[in-house]
Amino acid sequence: MNFLSRLAAALLCLFTASPPAQAEELPLPSSLPLLDYEAQLYPFIANRLFHDAKWTRDKRWRDTGPFVLDANYGVHPAVRIYYSPAVLQWLKDNRQGDIPDGAMVVKEMASPPAARYVEYREMLDYIYPDDPEKVEAEMIAYLKDTGSLNWTVMVKDSALSHGGWFFASVGQQGTIDNFDAPFTPPTGSAGDGTCMRCHASAAEELIYSSLNNVAGFGGEPLIFRVDESWRDLPAVQRPADGLTEAELISDVFHDQTVMAAAAAKPPASPTDVNPAFAATFPPTGGIDVSRADLQTLPSQWLDHVPARPNDTQHFLTSDNCVGCHGGLGGPPSGTTMFLQTGPKYGEGYNISEYGEWRWSPMGLAGRDPIFFAQLESEFALLEELGASDLSSNLGTTCLSCHGAMGQRQLQIDAHADPDAKLDPNNFKPSYTLLHAPLTKAEEDKQRQDGVFAYHQYGNLAREGISCAVCHHIQPPERAEGQPDYNTLDTYLMNGTTGVFRLSDADKLIGPYDDVRQKPMQNAMGITPEGDDYIKDSQLCGACHTINLPNVDADKTEPLEGYTAADQEVFNQAGRNGAAFLNAEYGVTFPEGLTDFQHSVEQATYIEWVNSIYNEEGTAQSCQDCHMKSSFQSTDGAINIPQITTQIASIQDSNYPDVDNLLPVEDVTVPFRDTYKRHNFVGLNVFMVEMLRQFSAEMGMGLIDPMTYADNGAQLSVDTMALQAAHETADITLNLEEGYGGLVAQVAVANKTGHRLPSGVGFRRSFLEVKVTDTGGDTLWCSGCTNGAGVIVDGNGKPLVTEFLDVVPLGGTEALYQPHHRVITNQTQVQIYEELTQNAKKEFTTSFVQRDYHPKDNRLTPLGTLNPGTEAFKAKFGDSDVTAAFMKATRPEGRAANDPNFIPGSDGVEYRIVLPQDTDLKSVTVSATLYSQSIPPYYLKQRFETAPTGPATQRLYYLASRLETKGTLIEDWKLKTVSASAVLP
């Protein structure tokens, strides 16, 4: 149902002759889809039928914190709470037992402080002493007009979530949610994480209500400091001589209008096609679709899966975490996990766990348009091969990382409840398009299509590598009957390719032992515990060492470069993973892939293992580099060597007093001077820019729900920029005369703890070595590109090697750029890359047809050792398992025999001949290392392999319109480091 249809349904509920539901007629939130329930609840609230039903309310309007110098420091605005009879009875019973389903707390809220409403009420009582109805009507009119009256609501429903409450924020118009762009958090939600931030610290039932506040009972509400700054007084009678903090801070924490206003101003998605891109990749074969026909993704706020009511499940969406681990952007709410750079709330950098993860490639993995286009190509290639029956096996395997929470939770649930008839062996990519139905019509459609049971797994999968993935992973174990493996081999044979063990569903691991457990237990039924494994690089290796089958290879012969013993190691590791998943969850999907010859498709973790960064004295873990403890802004204005902050923001002793708070020692979050950011970035600026520039199409909100900062995507890109410039590589250039021209010695050093580039094999880095005259004109260039990132020759024409599809006359294989020791002309380019071929020796970017490896000259890290050498044996011993896997970390092709290509660096000599009349001392030679995470040949293969696939069409739409001018990826390449020189 589109937005207009949903709006029409809401208006019918609000304004037709049918009266709003009475209190006793309201359904439970679990009985209806979200928007249908909001259409019942919101009119009841906005029309104040709870008042007509004579629910008991607070003695008077009251504040929830101090009000000083025109600024509210309360956790809410001024409030007056109404209690349904069941809640009142529970309070009268001394807050004992469970609040029954259907009970409700309605918090009327108005602009603080409460004093203005108390005084106005007293005035009305004086004017109309015998007309209480008149007093009430006038009071409500004043509240709506002057106080911006609105409501937050809690509805008890034990079927909803572990916490058992539905939270809602209702405005005077009773407007129900819509999940169209621009995307904002829902106003109604089961187990809402932003509300749980405070409510989880309550002693019982997630509410703080006390009879001290309630009319007709003894005691007095808590009183907070309120100065006279709210009054219309001359400056000399106002506090601090009229000075105000109102321009510095405002009551934004519970103000939906602030979020809505911020989100209403995102830039429009680009619509103009890049001419250079269209010329390189013509819109043919059905690849180019209109915006109306584009496959878009649901709002990120539909990725909502709370903890289940009884025993919580393993995987929950990040909106359960955002309230506590999303940071606070400044006064009046506080400044936690946030670097405030300006006076406004949210002006600065959100370095909270949620804030940086959200826009990292891990946080975007379940929405990655490149991944889903790749998967579509894999299915098409399998069909060409006559092996389309393997598509479900492969797709489910790939989504065990990219859609980790949904894929894994589905197999857990199917195993636990066979009667549910869930199919865990075919996690379809289309599930990522599903979401919990918002209306009965949407639910009926899902039931008709047979996908209703899977929408929650789509919600989870879209979250990618979310909080509950890493914080559940446990070390791999050696299964019964396996050899007596050492620790590394146990991992290699049992813990790669997304096959990770899990902690118990009601446990989450973290780096600290002294954590406050009660709030998370109250909110989600989960106990956080310290576990050093969260700091171990091996945890990252679960998804960063990938061992996959080669479905077109000869099953009787080992793959090129491996012995039969090596091959058996890889194959057995694949079988071990399948056996574990079958034994643990009863799934069989990997078994269809175990008949093929396996090889390591991605080796980032074991590249790190085979480096000095995994050695005593020089050790740096994955977390050391990709979870920084420091912060530096790109302009250098901020430089913090070690961040100190709380790692969660909850209702604690730093907040205004509340009744019925848990013991202070259970809610006091300590400051940590070992704080680790969750930035998780490499160099994939392309993907982040796609989701930022096309946020409406990709379902991403640009505004953070806790801090209201709108620069989350930019912070991710900035972090990549700093990493590219300072932590990726070094380059040196020495220049002299020779060979009738110039000789440039270019050396590139790898500063990372793995190959450069690493990860998926289609990424590449290349050297642009350019000679320019005094006017800046290019005289000679190896590695120059056009506007689509295609490497061109001296005449601006694409190199014949660029797309790996030109077979020379009389040849049998397509041309490519080999590894170079010496470059003598502009058609030769040093490209650091892995190139693979299928069984027909055609170049491919398929992950499961990688039979031949004519080239792998990606820069190895310092300390890389060759299996079979004495140095290797001294470090790793005589294990055949380790030796086989580590062969995937060595160079292949010409680089293997280049004396200048050594662990950590490479040197290339450029012999540059210029026109005879050139004054060699007047020219400048520059050398720049560029990175392309999705190079042109990769895109061409996607667009030609499955041009009518909706995910491929989506990638074409985004890539062809992506605005690169003025960004880090101008001309479709990312600059890392550069050097220049002139002759002395």
Image (cartoon, rainbow, N blue to C red):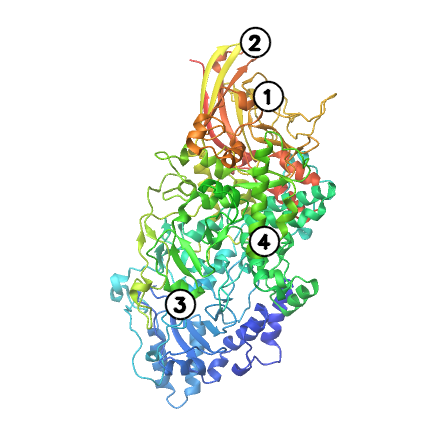
Judged from this view, the residue extending furthest toward the bottom is 130
Mark 1 to mark 2: distance in Å? Answer: 22 Å
- Report whether residue 299 is seen: no
Residue 411: % across, % down? 58, 57
For the N terminus, the quadrant is bottom right
- 1 or 3: tag closer to the N-terminus: 3
- Report whether residue 10 is seen: yes
- 1 or 2: tag closer to the N-terminus: 1
Mark 4 to mark 1: distance in Å? Answer: 50 Å
What secondary structure is marked by label 4?
helix
Q: Residues within 10 Å of mark 2 (few under 14, many from 20)?
A: few
Residue assigned mark 1: 828
Cβ–Cβ under 8 Å for marks 1 and 3? no
Q: Is residue 223 left or right of residue 182?
A: left
- Nearer to the camera, 247 or 818: 818
Residue assigned mark 4: 582
Amino acid marked by disc 3: His
Cβ–Cβ under 8 Å for marks 1 and 2? no
Residue assigned mark 3: 199
Q: Residues within 10 Å of mark 3 (few under 14, many from 20)?
A: many
Residue assigned mark 2: 916
Q: Is residue 857 above or below residue 966?
A: above
Amino acid marked by disc 1: Gln
Q: Is residue 131 above or below residue 164?
A: below
Amino acid marked by disc 4: Asn
Q: Is residue 419 left or right of residue 56?
A: right
- 2 or 4: tag closer to the N-terminus: 4
Mark 3 to mark 2: distance in Å? Answer: 79 Å
Residue appearing at x 25%, y 61% in the figure: 240
For the C terminus, the quadrant is top left
> Mark 2 or 4, which is nearer the eye?
4
